[in-house]
Image (spheres, coloured by chain):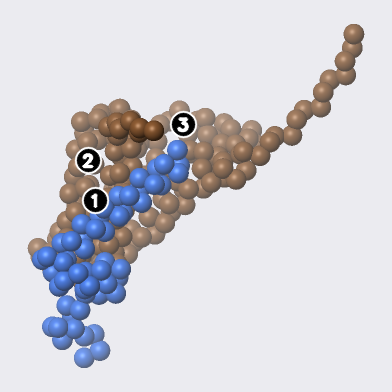
Chain colours: A brown, B blue
């Protein structure tokens, strides 16, 4: 059996970018205290990846998935309407908190990498340490938000809904 | 969809880890130090410089 090769689509490229960034961030975090050379390498890699992401967002404009993750007003309205009517299915799948957390984390990581640059050039290490430590909390919140919806959908959403009682047959 | 995204993310982490260890091997303190460094155990640079917190 032959597997047909194809070029990755825009979403797959974004996920690959995301993975490279996660790798750079994780290694930069782990090497912060003990391995300065590797820390600089992974930090500059993270900065380069952020530049690529922001340039791609600039050229993508409003086109998904490379556009900046701006939570749309209609998405919030729809989400709020479902919740106020007690429809908890709004929490399954993608919620407007996912793009919001994506936007916050992007802003935070720009701060982290720019402060890292300042730490490398002008020895502003305290600022970089503080921002980087704070960013870890934002990362965990982002992971929780983007994981909870799909996990809930997988665990709860696939269960068969109780069927409505059949109407009596009246000839 | 979620599984595919997670797989691509893990692939990216693997690529970045390999790139960092490769950089550390050729321009840093060697393969073993780079692997331990990337895992967060330090690459021995501070030991060589005598840069200890408890000194």
Query: Which residue does the image show at 29% across and 31% down from the upper left?
Result: A6
Label 2, label 1: how far apart the Cα atoms are: 10 Å
Residue at 39% of width from left, 40% of height from top? A99
- Residue A110: give its label: 1
Q: Are marks 3 and 1 on the same chain?
A: yes
Q: Is residue A4 left or right of residue A80?
A: left
Q: Residue furthest right?
A: A171
| Residue A78 left/right relative to A64 | right
Residue indicated by mark 3: A75
Q: Which mark is residue A30?
A: none
With respect to residue A113, does A98 lie above or below?
Answer: above
Q: Nearer the viewer, residue A98 or A104?
A: A98
Q: At numbered mark 1, what does the secondary structure look like: helix, strand or loop?
A: helix
Q: Earlier in the sequence, mark 3 or mark 2?
A: 2
Answer yes or no: is residue A113 visible.
Answer: no
Question: Residue A12, can we see it?
Answer: yes
Asked which secondary structure carries label 2, the reply is: helix
The earlier-in-sequence mark between 3 and 1 is: 3
Q: Residue at x 35, y 48 (%)?
A: B9
Q: Nearer the viewer, mark 3 or mark 2?
A: 2
- Percent x, y for residue A70? 35, 36
What x and y, as percent, mark residue A76? 47, 34
- Mark 1 chain: A
Please name the residue that numbered disc 2 is placed on: A54
Query: Which residue is at the front of the view, B10 or B31?
Result: B31
């Amino acid at each position: 059996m032959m597997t047909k090769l194809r070029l990755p689509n825009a979403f797959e490229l974004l996920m690959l970018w995301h993975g490279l960034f996660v790798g750079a961030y994780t290694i930069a975090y782990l090497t912060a205290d003990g391995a300065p050379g590797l820390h600089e390498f992974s930090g500059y890699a993270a900065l380069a990846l952020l530049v690529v992401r922001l340039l791609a967002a600039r050229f993508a404009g409003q086109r998904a998935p490379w556009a900046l993750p701006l939570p749309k007003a209609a998405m919030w309205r729809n989400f709020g309407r479902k919740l106020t009517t007690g429809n908890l299915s709004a929490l399954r799948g993608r919620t407007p908190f996912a793009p919001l957390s994506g936007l916050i984390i992007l802003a935070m990581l720009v701060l982290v990498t720019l402060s890292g640059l300042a730490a490398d050039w002008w020895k502003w290490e305290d600022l970089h340490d503080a921002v980087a430590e704070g960013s870890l909390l934002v990362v965990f919140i982002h992971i929780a938000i983007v994981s909870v919806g799909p996990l809930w959908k997988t665990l709860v959403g696939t269960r068969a809904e109780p069927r409505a009682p059949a109407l009596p047959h009246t000839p | 969809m979620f599984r595919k995204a997670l797989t691509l993310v893990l692939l990216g982490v693997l690529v970045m880890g390999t790139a960092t260890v490769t950089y550390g091997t050729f321009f840093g303190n060697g393969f073993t130090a780079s692997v331990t460094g990337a895992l967060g155990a330090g690459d021995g640079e501070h030991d060589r410089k005598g840069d200890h917190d408890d000194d």
